[in-house]
Image (cartoon, helix red, strand yellow):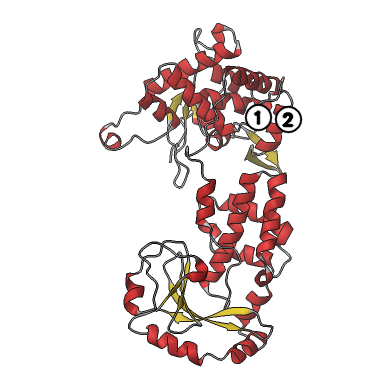
Amino acid sequence: MSEDTSDGPKAKASRKQRLSDTWISRYKPTLPQEDWFDTGCTDLVLRISYGGAKTFRVRYRDDGGKTRYHSIGRWNPDKFDVDAARQRARKFDPATECKRRGKDLPEDQAWWLSATFEQVIEKYITEVVAHFRTSSETARCYRRYVVPALGSKTFVDLKKTDAGLLRRTMRTENGPRQADIIFALIRSICFWVEDEEVIDGYESPLRYRPKRRGKNKRKSGGRERVLDDDELRMVWQAATQMGGLYGGLVRLLLLTAQRRQCLATAKWSEIVDGVWYIREEDGEAKGTGQVLRLPPLALQILNELPRIEGCDFIFGVEHNDEFKPLNSFSQRRDEMMELLPRPMPRWTLHDLRRTARTRMEDIGIDMQTGEVVLGHALPGVKRTYIRSSFAEKRADALLRLSEHIAQIVGLPPDQGKPSGPITTNVVPLSRAKRS
C-alpha cells in the first residue's frame, strides 16, 4: 500500500512508497535530499538528491552486520526504470560486494577508502572551492578549523559525533555563528562526496534538519542591535583612544555607513580630492561601485592613519613581506572593549552600519537617499528609470550624519562641519580605475 504524499513530507523512517515511473516523474521533493523506500522491494531505495539526481540504491548488511547502501544506477524511464531496478536489487549479492570492498578495488576507489579528511578537503578545495567567489575565505576556514581537529581521521570513518564535538568546542572558543559555519562546511564536503558517488555505498553522516533550523530563526528576521547615544559615545571615545588602524576603522564605519569588508579593503588610490571612488569588481559583494564625497571629519581621521611606504591599502599591514588589508577584527575588538568605561551589551562592526543608517533616518534624511548611501539597489522599476548617481545627496547625507555624530560624542563644532578648504594628503596623481 502506498502512502499519500499530498500532505507534505513524511519523517525519514516512514518515507515509503510503491515506486513507479509515473510517480517518480511527477514527484516534487520538499527537502534538500530524500530517500524513498520501495514497498514493492524492501531493499530498494530511491535517493532524490539536492542536485536533482534520482539514484537507485540497494540496502544490505556487510560482514560486520552494518547496514550499507550500494548505488545500482540512476533512474531513466527509457533505459533503467523501476522494474529494472527491482530486478537488479533482487539479484544483488551482498557477499560479492563485501568481498569487493575488501580487496581488488579500483585505484580510485582504494584512494577514497583510505584518504584522510585533510586529503579530501584539499581535493574539494581544488575541484570545487576554487570556483567560489569566497574561495580564499572558505579554504582558510577548512585549514584553520577543520584540518587541525579532524584532518588525520580517515574520511569514510568520520562520524556525526566528531563534527558535533568540534561544533560544541567552537561555540565556546569562537562563538556560535562561527561554529555553525564550520559545521555547514563539513556537511557540504560530505554531501559532495556522496553526490559524486565516488565511494560505493557512502552516505553522509550529517543530514539537513530544516525543522530545527526553522525554530532557531528569529521571527523579526535578523539582528536589530543599534547603539544608543551613550553607547555610541563610549565606542567613539574608545576607538579614538585606541587609535591606529582599528580605531580609525570603527569611526569611519560610523561616518560612511559602509560594509566592514568594503572599507577594510579600500585603497588610497581610490580617494581623489576627498571623494571615495569605491571600486566595482566582478563577483564582489553588493554595495560596490559608489562615489562618496567624504565629510571633513572622515578626511581628518584618514589623515591621522599610519601609512606603510609602498602599501596602497588604507588599512594595510605587512605580513611575510606582502601587503594585505587588516583582518584581525576580533582580536582588535577585544582590545578596544577593554578601553570602554563600563561593560555594554554585545555589538558587532556591522551593527555600526545599522546604527549609521538609523541615525540618518532620525535626522531627516529621506529613505531613498539613505538606501543609496548604503549601496542598496533601488526597488522595482525605480532602478530602471532613475539613473542618477545621487552624488550631491550622498555627500549631504554623510555631512549631516557626521555633524550629528560629532554632536553626540562631544567633538568641537568645527570638526563636524567644513571650515574652509579641505586639506588632505589623500591626493593621488590620477583618478582611480573602476573595473
Q: Give the mark, 1 or 2, whose residue is nearer the N terminus.
A: 1
Q: Is the residue 240 above or below the residue 385 in the image?
A: above
| Viewer-closest of 42 and 1 | 1
Per the image, label 1 sits on a secondary structure element best described as: helix
Crowd around label 1: few <14 · some 14–19 · many ≥20 (10 Å): many
Q: Specify whether 410 is left or right of 87.
A: right
Q: Is the residue 407 above or below the residue 101 in the image?
A: above
Where is residue 279 shown, x and y percent of the image?
A: 46, 36
**Which disc is residue 246 wearing?**
1
**Which residue does the image show at 55% across and 58% down from the upper left?**
129
The count of marks equals 2
Please say whether residue 428 is visible from this viewpoint. Answer: no
Where is residue 180 shown, x and y percent of the image?
A: 61, 50
User: Label 2 belongs to which residue?
Assistant: 335
Q: Are marks 1 and 2 in contact (CB under 8 Å)?
A: yes
**Which residue does the image show at 50% across and 50% down from the upper left?**
214
**Which residue does the image show at 70% across and 70% down from the upper left?**
154
Q: Specify whether 232 is left or right of 73.
A: right
Crowd around label 2: few <14 · some 14–19 · many ≥20 (10 Å): few
Residue type marked 1? Tyr
Q: Is the residue 4 above or below the residue 164 in the image?
A: below
